[in-house]
Amino acid sequence: MIASARPAGVRLRSFAGLGGRSLRARPLRSGLTAAGIVLGVGMAFGVLVLVATIHSSFGSLFNTIYGNTDVIVSGKASVGEVPQRTLGQVRRVEGVKAASGQVMGLFRVIGTEGKAQTGAAATLFVAGTNLRGPDTAGATLVEGTKPRGPRQIELEEAWARSHGLTRGDTIRLATPTGEAALLVSGIFRFGTALDLGGYGTAAAPLGSVRRMTGKATGWDGIDVIAASGVSAAELSRRIRAVVGPGIEVATPAAKSEEVNEAMSSLDIVLYFFSGMAIFVSVFLILNSFNMTVLQRIREIGTLRALGASRRRIATSVLGEALFLAIPGCALGLALGIGLAELLAAAMRSFFGLPIAALDVTPGALVAAVAIGLLATTAGALYPSLRAGRIAPVRALTGAVGSERRPGLPRALLGAALFLPGMAIGGLFWFSNASGTTTAAIVGVGSTLMMFVGMVLLAPFLVMPLIDLLARPVRALMPSEGRLATDSLRMNPLRTSATAAALVVTLSVVVVNATMSASFLGSISSQLDAHFARDLTVQPLGYSSYGPPVSAIAPSLRRQIAALPAVGTVTPERIVYMRKLPGSREPGLLEAVEPSRWPRVDKSEYEGASTAAAMAGLGAGGAVVGRRFAEATGLGVGDTVALRGAGGVVRAPIVATTDTFEANGNVVMVSLATLRRAYGITSDSTLALTAVSPDRRAALARQVGALLERRYPGFEAVSDAEVKKQYESAINQQFSFFDAIVGIAVIVGLLGIINTLSMAVIERTREIGVLRALGGSRWRIRRTMLTESVLISVAGSLVGIGLGLLVGIVWIISIRESTLVGLKLGIPTSMLIAIAVLGVLIGVLAAIVPARRAARLDPLKALTYE
Amino acid sequence: MSSTSVRPDPAPLLEARGLTRAFGAGATAVQALRGVDLTVGEGELVAIMGPSGSGKSTLLHILGALDRPDAGSVSIDGRRYDDLSDRELTRLRGEVFGFVFQFFNLLPTLSAAENVLLPALVNGERPAGYAARVDALLGRVGLGDRAAHLPTELSGGEQQRVAIARALLRHPRLVLADEPTGNLDSKAGGSVMRLLRSVVDDGQTVVMVTHDPGAAALADRVVFLRDGEISGEVEGGDTARVIDAFREIEAGAQPERAAA
């Protein structure tokens, strides 16, 4: 006999083949379980790819743009300008082969209809430099010539191609000084491929960029090429010694490292959501295999009676799970790519980050598959061991006894995980401490702990609620209601496992909604309390945390001031700093004109009257936000040291203020102080008032006309519109998370469908009895539907309740440290929508199981053992 | 039937002495077995009868190494197995015993032939070595043409015959049957019993638990159990005698020991 010959009618090759059979015999559950794995692997892989892509984007960005550059000289903390004289100082340093000063412009493409376009793809970074000087970027001209005249520009190849531009074309750009039409003289290519997520790069003669940006002197940066034999580190040291402490000297690698570090807290957030997805997928696998094992007690008992060891049974169940993990991982990888694309697109448009094409590393691939296998093993381990412990006598007796009721230890463990997780989670997510990696890890860990606690506590909240709901349901539908509620109560663990999936997912949505409603409501009332202006002029797409935008040139301010309806026009110069002077926390450095500022802003100051505070600013002092004062311990009478290119400027603190901007991490100085310290001379926004209240409409009309005619890169917005822009900025940040939460809701749905199907299978015989006693299909269907909706309503209510509780606790715990005047906002309409969604999930989840139950042949169901 | 004749002094294959087994504790404790002695000779078909709750299932579980007694000993071929570990009991079940269940317990996803092959698979063996054996067994139980059928495509009687073939696959020393006809109509039950009888006539030893006096009558011996104790024994072969003896047991009287 040859070894592969099998007996007639036998296709199994070994015991392991049993698992495959059993999976195929239950396609619905197998599919749902695999879907759990798909989601877990998908999220993990998507996030890993996205994080790798984000980091390699910035890495390649610096490597490419600074292809030939060894050392970059820029304003301190990448803020502010480098004085004109510094270029000469750098050139004289021994070991410098060449140094090239640059002025950067951020311009917007003007479309065919004459309007400046927004979005990354319409944004062009133009480097103004001496084009006859050394090439610090390492770019090659692939077509045409270098720009020769003031009205010429050369474009990066990929961006030019995607905009259909080629040599000889004219490109129209919205610049701080108005519209510019430039001739494309040539197309260049960087030394390595560059993908800025849509942003364009270009080069133009220095004088031309100076004119277009309105920056008459100073540099945004100086690129240095080292002489051969001089290391970048050594050269950095020598340059630092010459230019002084207010100027930053760094290698391109150090720069990209710095940006990558700044991105690391975002990484943690992404890891958190993939952690959530993996948690839910483990939960789904656990649930599903627990059910399988329960349902197959007699079968497993038989195998044990036939001589299968505990170990063989346990490995077989585990093998079944891992067998599912194979297609699960494969589909998960595909889903992950899709998710990464989606999230990358969201990050480009919501945060304006230059995310390149996806960078799929073998490491991420291996890690995601490993995570999938681990999650599957983790989920199937307990059911496997449980299967192994099934006594062989069960072959004869089948399942006996009723299900265990959840006990006190479970409640205590649940509370022990939930309460501390809830108490501290919010601090790490929303307070100023959230910037550091450790804080993010603690935040993620405590939040996951909170959700595990929620799952453990679910039965103690869901079951009483179901008891409560049972009454009206029974009153409405005596027989179906009774059957449905009895079945739910008989199996408290199954019922709460089903509901737990919903509790967790919906509570995440509710927490998210509560937090965003609270922030929005508070910021809106803060704006009302501070704004006294009639109109704000700002670059298109402006927001204090948003994508980079162009600055406002002095010429625009002068022209607005000359308009007849304008009473006051005063600039605000806002600089985002990764570390505020004297602080370890990020925040905003804000400069205003002390003489005119109170006319457009009615903020109140502590420690000084408004007039005294403004006088103090005018005399070189500073007003600080409350959070800054708390974080640094500095107060009125102390000084803030501003270290910029202009040397150290010591500003005495003259007052503190409550502001919502940057959670109160704000340092406010006069325009003059800002210029003295950092050399910054361009405006971020302009605040305007009309000459008289009755001229407000005229003001808006005149400014609008000016901008439309001359400055298409800018817009004039009313206070209401500013509010709306803040709202949409906040909404966007929260909706980025909502998108990820949506995936969790799908998982919740899968969980419910899964457990409900189990419920039908478990009760096959009972349903047969009902049918035999004359129960119609419609009645069976209604029973299943009632059961499902009861679970989902109870789950939704508990989810909403716990979500609100967490939201309220988080708002209270961060009120002091985060946003001054933060008040709890209850997103009522959202809560109603979530409740409706919960019921819908219940109905949706019942469709398949209810059909199945109704279609059972009563005869077969009765003989089902 | 000639097979009803009693074999003179059969070699003792299975020996149980003083088996006791209780379930639960305290007030709700149930004493299922209270010192049961039983000897089964090689090649015998022994039926165990008794009313519900008499402990007959518990006895079968212990004899079949599915459960352990609280006290007493049980041995097969002179080897005790009442005190073995779970691992050793598992090995014993795979190598020494065959089982036939009231509800057949065929795996619904496996064909008839695959179900027959299951004990080999469970014990880590490859199908190839069993091709001839599976064919022969299916032929033996009259299902040679049903090898590829799934359990749902077979009648109850056919399923039980597959189960008998499965029990015999690895040449067990002892086959234990739990109400083998309990879930079958009388015609199918009769054919299953005749199959078991013929298996015993070929030299196989079988111990079965049954409610059915007709089935028990095909045994060589019928042992009666009541309240966890052996309450009598009659020779098989005659349904009327078995019914009478069973009635007496039910009535609580000690049946007259049938003369050999």
Image (spheres, coloured by chain):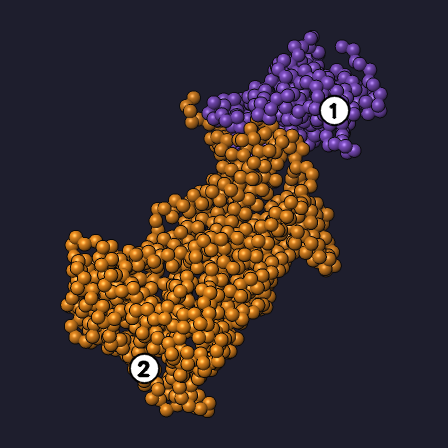
Farthest residue toward the front?
Answer: A637
Mark drawn on residue B33: 1
- Residue where numbered disc 2 is placed: A556
Residue at image coords 52%, 46%: A282
Residue A799, percent from left and from top: 60, 58
Tell me the colour chain B is drawn in: purple
Q: Is residue A38 visible?
A: yes
Chain containing the residue with disc 2: A
Please state if B223 lies on the left or on the right of B206 as rendered.
right
SS of the residue under disc 1: strand
Which quadrant is the N terminus of chain A positioned in? top left
Amino acid type at circle 2 is: Leu
Residue at image coords 56%, 28%: A308
Residue A461, percent from left and from top: 65, 54
Tell me the colour chain A is drawn in: orange
Marks 1 and 2, how far apart in space? 102 Å
